[in-house]
Image: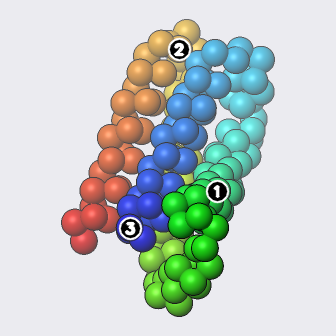
């Protein structure tokens, strides 16, 4: 449960959300796209993408923990405190560090893809549909590759 509920599900969900959000924003918002492709804004946006990935993962992890606690309280009719305490006593903090490292790798991968796509937009501003399909397809493949590599290692 710790590996899936507190490990792979939050990192995969947050990465997929950020991938789709950045892809849609790059392909649909003309004013913002013009600002990103000017000067050094691409670097700032890339760094912001990585930071948002890590922040969203932290908030999602907290939400998963709160939902887990609420589920325990509901299932055990409000008497979940001994189970909750036992869960924290047996909680392996290495798994949290491992998930944070995986999220950092995913953030770097998504940020690098964002930087590349932003630079491609500078040279080819009319290929928005190609940008969206390429960005989402390669991004999803990268997310799945990182998650599968982590599962297999």
**Quick one: SS at disc 2?**
helix
Residue 60: where, in percent of width, then height? 62, 54
Residue 108 in sight: no
Kindly identify the residue that appears in the image at 49 percent across and 46 percent down. 13
Choose between 118 and 99: the one closer to the eye: 99
Residue 81: where, in percent of width, then height? 62, 79
Residue 102: where, in percent of width, then height? 45, 64
Kindly identify the residue that appears in the image at 52 percent across and 86 percent down. 86
**Quick one: SS at disc 3?**
loop
Query: What residue would you read off at disc 3?
Result: 1
Kindly identify the residue that appears in the image at 51 percent across and 75 percent down. 96
On the picture, is 9 further left or further right than 123? left
Kindly identify the residue that appears in the image at 42 percent across and 39 percent down. 139
On the picture, is 146 further left or further right than 81? left
Q: CA distance from mark 1 to mark 3?
A: 16 Å
Query: What residue would you read off at disc 1?
Result: 63
């Amino acid at each position: 449960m710790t590996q899936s509920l507190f490990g792979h599900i939050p990192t995969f969900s947050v990465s997929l959300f950020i991938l789709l959000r950045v892809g849609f924003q790059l392909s649909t918002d003309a004013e913002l796209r013009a600002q990103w492709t000017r000067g050094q804004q691409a670097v700032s946006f890339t760094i912001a993408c990585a930071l948002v990935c890590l922040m969203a993962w932290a908030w999602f992890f907290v939400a998963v923990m709160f939902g887990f606690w609420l589920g325990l309280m509901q299932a055990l009719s409000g008497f979940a405190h001994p189970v909750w305490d036992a869960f924290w006593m047996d909680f392996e903090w290495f798994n949290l560090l491992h998930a944070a490292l995986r999220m950092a790798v995913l953030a770097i991968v998504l940020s690098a893809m964002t930087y590349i796509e932003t630079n491609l937009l500078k040279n080819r501003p009319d290929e928005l549909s190609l940008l969206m399909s390429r960005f989402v397809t390669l991004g999803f493949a990268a997310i799945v590759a990182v998650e599968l590599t982590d599962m297999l290692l």
